[in-house]
Amino acid sequence: MDSDTLYWMGLTRIGGLGVRSAHKLITHFGSPKAAYMASLTELEGAGLAASLCQSVFAQAGLKEAEKEIEAAAKAGCRLVNFGDADYPPRLRQIPDPPLVLYVKGEIQALSGHCLAVVGSRRPSAYGLQVARRLARDLAQACGSLGHIAALRRLRVGPFTEQQAIPLDKLRAADDTAPASPDLLLPVATALADIPALALTEAEAVGLRHGQAISLVALMGRIPRTADPNGGLARAMAGSRVVGPCRLGDGLLKPERLL
């Protein structure tokens, strides 16, 4: 694993740290690794918010970065960070260039003249036809090639594309039986990658009414893998999922209740 890419990717996984702020941090310290190695006092001197200083100092984002790098390798993607010589020079010139690029194919192609048509995530059939015609006509007019690609989600929480259930299995036709109830999984399964935090019934009721809970009251119950500076926790009341909650500023706040 490229250690430089690990630290570049780590910064992208810190909640609340935008691309521009990350670039300012890197400019101040010289590299992402140097930023992660800095003391808390040095980080505060870089002009970051106190919560972000705590996150970087606590090495937040690095574990998630390791998983993301492994997932990219399995998907056949090459990761190119902003400090890499192969990073497209024109992309460097925009106000907020991405810290890390996921690349398939020849990245050198991005250094020449390029034209892209970006459309809706859920295009209509007519929209797809128009996009294809535009790509074809533009390529012919430029004496070049037109390439059409669609991004699709390969993972949702702990579920991979291989675990997806085709809609045909869920639709009941006149000559087929209804879908098996075994296809339905508990809500907690979809949130299994978020550390669980046990609550009392009274605490769960409070969250449902929008009330935050002091982390002091939760001492001893907060999972070690939950980042206290902006991390998520899966609030549980017994075996029942209350919903994802955000830790920060000494409080547990409801993010989305189920």
Image (tube, rainbow, N blue to C red):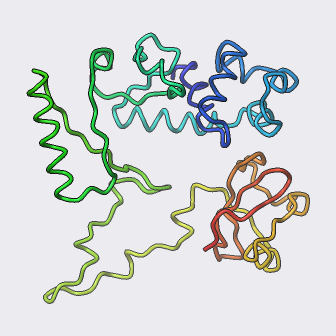
Question: Seen from this angle, which residue lies furthest top?
Answer: 85
Q: Depth check: 181 or 170 in front?
A: 170
Task: Indicate whether 143 appears above or below 162.
Answer: above
- Name the residue at the right extreme: 216
Quadrant where the image shows the C terminus: bottom right
List x then y, in percent, for residue 17.
66, 36
Identify whether 87 is placed above or below 15.
above
Horizontal arrangement in the rendering, residue 25 relative to residue 174 (left or right): right
Quarter location, residue 131 = top left
Q: Which residue: 37% across, 74% down? A: 183
Residue 254 place in picture, x, y as percent: 71, 65
Using the image, determine if residue 193 lies above or below residue 75: below
Name the spot of residue 177 as percent of width and height, x first. 22, 87
Please give the name of the residue rendered at 16% of the width and 57% of the height, measured from the top-left corner.
126
Nearest the eye: 23 or 100:
23
Spot the residue most to the bottom.
174
Question: In this rendering, is residue 258 above or below 154?
Answer: below
In the displayed structure, does residue 196 sit left or right of residue 120? right
Displayed quadrant of residue 175: bottom left
Residue 157 relative to residue 244: left or right: left
Identify which residue is drawn at 75% across, 49% down. 224
